[in-house]
Amino acid sequence: MTQKILVGLSVRAFLRRHWQKKPLLARRALPHYAKLVTRDALFALAARDDVQSRIVSRTRNRWQVAHGPFSKRELARLPARGWTLLVQGINQMLPAAQALLLEFAFIPYARLDDVMVSYAPPGGGVGPHFDSYDVFLLQLAGTRRWRISSQRDLALIENAPIKVLRDFHPEREWLLAPGDMLYLPPRIAHDGIAIDHCLTASVGFRAPGAQELGARFLEFLQDELALKGIYRDPELQVQHHPARIGGGMLQKVRRMLGQIDWRASDILRFLGQYLTEPKPHVFFTPPARPLTAAAFARRAARLGLQLDLKTQMLFRGRQVFINGERCQVGRAATPLLARLADRRRIAAPLALDAEAAHWLYQWYRAGYIELDTRERVSE
């Protein structure tokens, strides 16, 4: 399947020639996802308060952005041309969108972000812009014209509510039909205009900036700090300028702050929790009438398990990270939990050791995982 969506390229060839280097146009890459979501279903998602949505519109040279949720009346009043509805994270709502995201599992999950779907009537688009991350643009329905440029001038229109390039000089263009896909590396300028009523899926990849990582890591360290001692100066001398910060104080405080330290293990714990932390609007629903631990273990062994669509799960060694939590697991439980993280679903029959059953039951109670509902048996 991977070679098909990469127009015959092996994963190695794609990563070597294109990933973060140059665009790739793949005709008929994923035609079976053309019915991933309908316009009406996307509108219904945009009406939910647990889904991020926005409408970008343009009147002459003025851009406007409105944030959801949107009522049916608001959506019905939209004009016939020149606007775009964007709905983020539909892979957290639709199993088919999660399956689409997993088509790109040749990129580590730590880099996968989400699937965004946009709907636009003729003339709709969000303007020429660039992204700081890799993106695959899959046409689901209708036709969209994409124009791209490797221009170095990435200056933006001042005071615009969205990032729109001030000057865009397209170098290449294509018309994408349902099933066609365009890969763009970071900082490639692009502009997509709907030719007719169209739906486009955007598979994005996380690329946090150094500033964000640094700030979040310092927050993480703050929770871990346990510095010893208090400021003392028994040798204090008369100071002629009481407002002056003395060199002795600077040295003492420097030694106190010198206790702040971190190791590679701290970076791993931070990164695992940071990368799996749910976005602020994401919530999990525990089972209304949870099974007992014993009943859950029996049914899980018989049915199999799957991650909730909203769950993010990563691992390294015997450390498992799930939805911002870190779990240190035993050697016997590690293979099964790693398989669940890799595949997001493990089929029956399962052989659960006591520790694996313990962690899985805790996550089941939290709403992070569920029994595989593709089969049902009576308990």
Image (cartoon, helix red, strand yellow):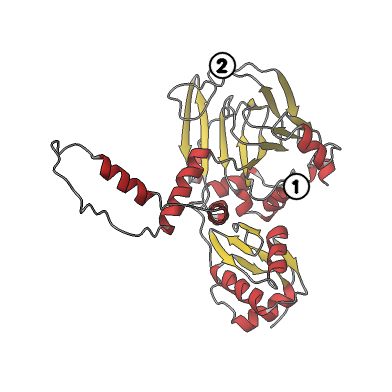
**Location of mark 2 (residue):** 167
Q: What is the three-letter code of the residue carrying label 1?
A: Phe
User: For the point 84% across and 40% down, which residue is it?
Assistant: 10
Q: What is the three-letter code of the residue carrying label 2?
A: Asp
Helix, strand or loop status at disc 1: loop
Total marks drawn?
A: 2
Tell me which corner region of the image, top left, top right, bottom left or bottom right, holds residue 165.
Answer: top right
Residue reaching furthest right? 8
Sequence-earlier tag: 2 or 1? 1
User: For the point 83% across and 47% down, which residue is it?
Assistant: 1
In the displayed structure image, the side of residue 33 where residue 354 appears, left or right: left
**Location of mark 1 (residue):** 106
Give the quadrant of the C terminus.
bottom right
Residue 55, horizontal then vertical, whole percent: 52, 36
User: For the point 59% across and 24% down, which residue is it?
Assistant: 128
Tell me which corner region of the image, top left, top right, bottom left or bottom right, holds residue 119.
Answer: top right
